[in-house]
Image (cartoon, helix red, strand yellow):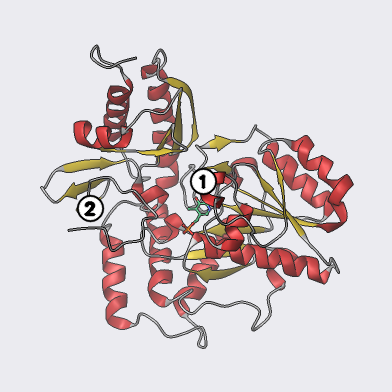
Amino acid sequence: MTAACLMSTYQPLALSFNKGLGTRLWDQTGREYLDAVAGVAVTNVGHSHPKIVAAITEQAGLLLHTSNLYSIDWQQQLAQKLTRLAGMDRAFFNNSGAEANETALKIARLYGWHKGIEQPLVVVMENAFHGRTLGTLSASDGPAVRLGFNKLPGDFLKVPFGDLKALEALQQAHGSRIVAILMEPIQGESGVQLAPPGYLKAVRELCNRRSWLLMLDEIQTGIGRTGQWFAFQHEGIVPDVMTLAKGLGNGVPIGACLARGKAAELFTPGSHGSTFGGNPLACRVGCTVLDIIEEQGLLDNARLQGERLLGRLRTELADNPNVSALRGQGLMIGIELKQPIRDLSLIAARDHGLLINVTRGQVIRLLPPLTIDEREVEMIVRGVSAVLTPTWDEPQ
Ligand SMILES: *Cc1c(COP(=O)(O)O)cnc(C)c1O
């Protein structure tokens, strides 16, 4: 087989899987791997969960697609469940994270338009990642994703993540044009970056004072990843707009934009849409994912195993010469390295049967399914310590 017919947007490892069950994957030779990537925070309830298999199978035999020209029962059910869990009013469904964020950005535009703001500005964070469409790329940071696409649409102001003073200072120069803040509660792609405690709450208060929309990108942090349904719930706040995708479909493509109050009332028939968005299959799977998380107590498990994993890593890696920092919330954990180590995820897979992700070159990101148990936590700790422990024949 050759990948020469594919556009080279990725550099995949020389690894390929053809079966998954729970926290495990198998390659073509039948070798088993423990999956601490979960398709990048997607398969939160594990691979081939029997309830999801059953939901997909039954729905495929009933109806895959009609159109948003007709009302879709599963879509309404999913909207009801999500809005209830999040304390939001309305939902719009699409097929990916980037599209969900595009929806949020369009809400911000409409919000400004209704207020008579000619050239609305959205505040975003340094090192943010919001997707790969032209709009969401404009809201994202970092030369790697933006190189060659320089003239990007949209008007964004960028401030350092976690810096409240920088946010407050924007009012003077741009106050009358700012309509919203778009941010991740924890920055995933840029290496599991956490904001200082109380930051999100202070941002919420600032948005209230200025009548800016607080729009949270929970595409990676949402659906139980951090030990709450949504990461903002750790801070006891509610955003005006929230976006979801990744874990919502456990591998079936689906994105969602939820909104509350004024932000939920801005779209009118014709102002937004999606052919596939909110189809019966994806929405039924979304409902099933939420049911499974509830039935299996996966929020508690994510909290418990996340604390255990972070604690065990702190112990095991305390004196490790390769590690400069450890951080995380729930089952979203970052291990920052002093410098990049080549082929780390390949070595972990090859030598230890452990799948890990490395982001921004030198942060190991652990995102195992929310179903992992104590024994599997130990397997991750052992595998990660082993790849990070220098041996006598390796140059230091
Ligand atoms: C993955 C991700 C996106 C983009 O989602 P896609 O489904 O790839 O478009 C946006 N924001 C965050 C925080 C993400 O982690």
Real-space Cα separation, disc 2 to disc 1, in angstroms: 32 Å
Label 1 beta carbon less than 8 Å to ligand 1: no
- Tell how many labels: 2
Please name whichever residue, 6 or 109, is drawn nearer the observer in this view of the structure: 6
**Which type of secondary structure does the marked residue at label 2 adopt?**
strand
**Residue 66, image x, y percentages:** 42, 85
**Residue 35, image x, y percentages:** 29, 43
Residue at x-position 67% and y-position 36%: 162
Q: Is residue 153 visible?
A: yes
Residue at x-position 38% and y-position 66%: 285
Task: Kindly indicate the quadrant of the structure image that contains residue 194.
Answer: top right
Q: Above or below — where is 396 with respect to 247?
A: above
Which circle, 2 or 1, is nearer the viewer?
1
Residue at x-position 78% and y-position 50%: 207
Label 2 beta carbon less than 8 Å to ligand 1: no
Q: Is residue 2 left or right of residue 329?
A: left
Dot 2 surroundings within 10 Å: few (below 14), some, or many (20 or more)? some
> In the picture, which quadrant includes the N terminus?
bottom left
Which residue sits furthest left?
29
Q: Above or below — where is 24 with respect to 337?
A: below
Give the residue number, with chain letter if any, for mark 1.
Answer: 144
Please name whichever residue, 67 or 356, is drawn nearer the observer in this view of the structure: 356
**Which type of secondary structure does the marked residue at label 1 adopt?**
helix
**Residue 289, image x, y percentages:** 39, 59
Q: Above or below — where is 84 with respect to 127?
A: below
Give the residue number, with chain letter if any, for mark 2.
Answer: 20
